[in-house]
Image (cartoon, helix red, strand yellow):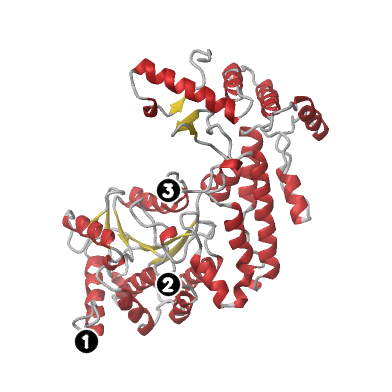
Amino acid sequence: MNTQRKTAFVTGFKKTVQALVEQTQTLYLSDGIPWVVGYSGGKDSTAALQLIWYAVSKLPEKKRIKPVYVISTDTLVENPIVALWVESSLEAMEKAAIDQNLPITPHRLTPEVADRFWVNLIGRGYPAPRPKFRWCTSRLKINPSNNFINNVIRQNGQVILVLGTRKAESVVRAVNMAKHEKTSTREKMATNASLPNSWIYTPIADWTNDDVWMYITQVKNPWEYNNKALLSMYQGATADGECPLVVDTSTPSCGDSRFGCYVCTMVEQDKSMQAMIQNDEEKEWMLPLMKLRNEWLDIKEDRKHRDFRRMSGVLKVVGGRLVHGPYKQAFREKLLRALLQAQQDVQKDGPPEVKNLELITYNDLEEIRRLWVMEKHEIEDNLPKIYERVMKQPYPGKRLDDNQVFQPEDIILLKEICQQEGDNENIHFQLIRELLHLEQQHRTMARRAGLYDSLDKSLERNAFENAQEAEEFALRRKSAVALARGEEDNTVENLPLFTNNTAIS
């Protein structure tokens, strides 16, 4: 028995596409609200953008008034092949829109320096993302796109988002899209729960995977890009899907898609990059990126590299043991060395288009350096030394603090003096180093307000010899707090170290 393939083109391919183009034209002309089209370079967003492009281009020039912004978010840790594809596509779009006199402008968005992956991982010491601490999606994806969209809303009052999302992608996606369609006050558009004053238009919502491929392979790309090359890129890997424009946490992140961040730890393996390398020996230059992710970002084995205290110094106990916090200084420095070495290897062995590929930018390095020295009080200022050792060239940055009075030999001597038997964490050295730096930071102030509070916090944070001592203290404190509240021990998690500066023993 033959079963008919499911398709949205039940009335015929050309007729269905033409109806969608006409529907899009009607919506475009119905008001003065600008459109923002999410473009990731994948098949779905390409199909949606093509429909919008053809719809606008077939209108009389005098009616092409309303701006259409095409936004693509580059996390700066994307699969480099996909990142290069998207960058070239945006350049082609810009030229084609000018040549065709269309009100379409592409925008490549990137995270703020403070939100970038390596700044948070190596600089602040955030552990690699995991299901219970998925700090990357909002910083790398949601914030850049939402900042752009909110800016359009501030200037125009409202915005219409055009997305290439489809109901056939998953049951959850279909239910979510249907819910927002029902609550919408506008025909053919859905409400946007995460962004006020905005609607969502999904022109290919009812298309299947095969429908998308049929459309983008049979209809010429209007910005003169090669859709067959896109198909080849998909064929080079094994999984299905793409990295969508993420505007809220309900949208699947890159970790569940074909093309995502090469550092993603939300999946066990980067199957797309692995397949690209296996299927094409010319892509073996990406091996250092796979090695970097697999060897240095293993969330199952990273507890030993993390401080037993949280970022704020608070002790958190779950299941009878401490939940460890940020990566330790030694591991962060090793990770930076590995990253810079991977960058050198990729530039050396890769094709001409990646000879200048930066896995980490100078601005990222400067922010990491500032975080290490000014916030973590790692006054050794080791980043320039690490850079020069790996890159074999002088570090381009300037001295962080002209008032720095501690020379390298002073730091070495201080570390030797503070070293005690059994102090594997170098707690005494960290404490004295931090106290000296805090005093130095406040020295030039007319009013040294906050100095004593900072000193108190430093003493509290470095009050333990090691993780075992801290864990024993935390368990006793947890029991005492629970007893005082009349609660079970497991209801108390975040514990301040001291109460009125007096430890509870």
First along the sequence among labels 2 and 1: 1
Q: Secondary structure at mark 3?
A: loop
Q: Eyeballing the image, is 30 above or below 394? A: below
- Disc 2 to disc 1, how far (Cα)? 45 Å
Q: Position of residue 266 (x, y in %)?
A: 46, 54
Residue type for callout 3:
Pro
User: Is residue 496 left or right of 392 when viewed as pictured?
Assistant: left
User: Is residue 9 left or right of 229 when viewed as pictured?
Assistant: left
* Pick the front one: 450 or 262: 262
Q: Position of residue 91 (x, y in %)?
A: 50, 70
Residue depicted at 43% across the width and 17% down the height: 480
First along the sequence among labels 3 and 1: 1
- In the rendered image, which residue does mark 3 sit on? 131
Residue 87 shows in the view: no
* Pick the front one: 4 or 385: 4
- Label 3: few (<14), some (14–19) or many (≥20) C-alpha neighbours in 10 Å: few
